[in-house]
Image (cartoon, rainbow, N blue to C red):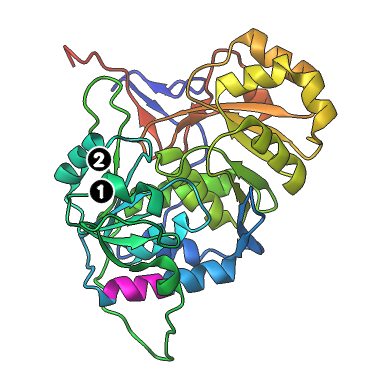
Amino acid sequence: MDPRSGFCKSNSVFYSKRNPTPLPPNQYLDVTTFISSKAHHGKVAFIDAATGRHVTFSEHWRAVDSVATCLSDMGIRKGHVILLLSHNSIIFPIVCFAVLSLGAVITTTNPLNTPREIAMQIADSKPVLVFTVSNLVQKLAGFELPIVLLDDPQTIPREVKILTSLQEMIKKELPNGSRRVRDRVNQDDTATLLYSSGTTGTSKGVISTHRNYIAMIETFVARFKTEDTFICTVPMFHIYGLGAFTMALHALGSTIVILSRFDMHELLSAVSTYKATCLPIVPPVVVAMVNDADKIKTKYDLSSLRSILCGGSPLSKEVIEGFLNKYPEVDILQGYALTESTGTGASANTAEEGRKYGSVGILTANSEAKIMDPETG
């Protein structure tokens, strides 16, 4: 194997040059249990950037337990698919972890999807229950699926069946010694069914297992620090938002400041208000930060910011150099990943790796890659 590239001529495979990440040997382990058992010194788990409302780690896990118990009482079992239709919020992770703890499967969908697009996903994934918010309920009219509201009920169509609200589920008292029905979850069991963007055709469901997420989480834990505060601007229905922010950084004990939707002013205000140290953004935002650097630095205090994580498309040398010139204390770390690779792939983890223009970094630990011709194999 070539020590510089990690390429092996005998099988044409690229191997990661990063140190292997150890994975738990226990075959019967779900990702919720794995994350909740991680030791850290974090206190505040999630903050709503707009309102300042926050959830501590202890409050979060109590809520997960209550919601999981309610779902079990409703008859939700291993293998059942639960649809989550919502914008980013501090309660989004509660639903995910509660569902996954039972061995049930989460499928998410874009709140901007049309009723027709949602119908196609429902027909393909066959959910038995939906979590959503009042202003999106109309998109589910006619499906006869039971719904749990994530917010207070507003005007709801008559044909929609509302079971309860998440707040009512969270309020459930758990008597001492109570035991809910829970199937044994294997690391190889399906955890999520996420739908790709459909860039090369119709959107397709991508299966990720509990093992996939556990491996992804371990790579993040090895890379980042507990004391970091992250701004979540990416959608949580997407693998990046779900895998990195809902799961991996939460396992690390980091504080995640959540924006329900992207807005440049709210993004920069959140960095300033909550002293964020790490910011995930896409290339157009980097370009905007370069072009308007003088105005931005006058209006917002970005002194806490140490790094930006950028993906989606490559940054040019000119943009990178322009950014580093305007924000010399901030590192640019690019990365590349897929839904199919559970949000990992390759990344620049240090400032030195990030200065290799035209590169998205080194293969993630434990990863292998191969360049294939789709026609000839």
Q: Residue 65 has which mark?
A: none
Q: Label 1 crowding class (10 Å Cα cut-off): few <14, some 14-19, many 20+?
A: many
| Vertical side of 351 occupied by 133: above or below | below
Asked if the stretch drawn in magenta spans residue 68, the answer is yes
111 or 93: which is nearer to us?
111
State the image coordinates of residue 17 (x, y, percent, origin top left). Answer: 50, 31
Quadrant in the picture for the N terminus: top left
Residue 205 in sight:
no
| Tag 1 residue | 140
Q: Nearer the viewer, mark 2 or mark 1?
A: 1
Residue range corresponding to the magenta coloring:
66-72
Work out whether 259 lies above or below 117.
Answer: below
Q: Main secondary structure of the magenta part?
A: helix
Q: In the rendering, at what x and y percent does residue 303 appear? A: 81, 36
Relative to 184, 47 lies left or right: right
Task: Tell me which label, 2 or 1, sits earlier in the chain.
Answer: 2
Is 58 a magenta residue? no
- Front residue of 363/282: it is 282
Q: Residue at x 65, y 61 (%)?
A: 44
Give the residue number, with chain letter if any, for mark 2: 118
Horizontally, residue 144 falls left or right of residue 1, namely left
Whether residue 178 is visible, yes or no, is yes
Residue type at tag 1: Leu
Percent position of residue 2, x then y: 45, 20
Q: Quadrant of residue 27?
A: bottom left
- Residue in the image at 66% along x and 38% along y: 266
Tell me which amino acid carries mark 2: Ile
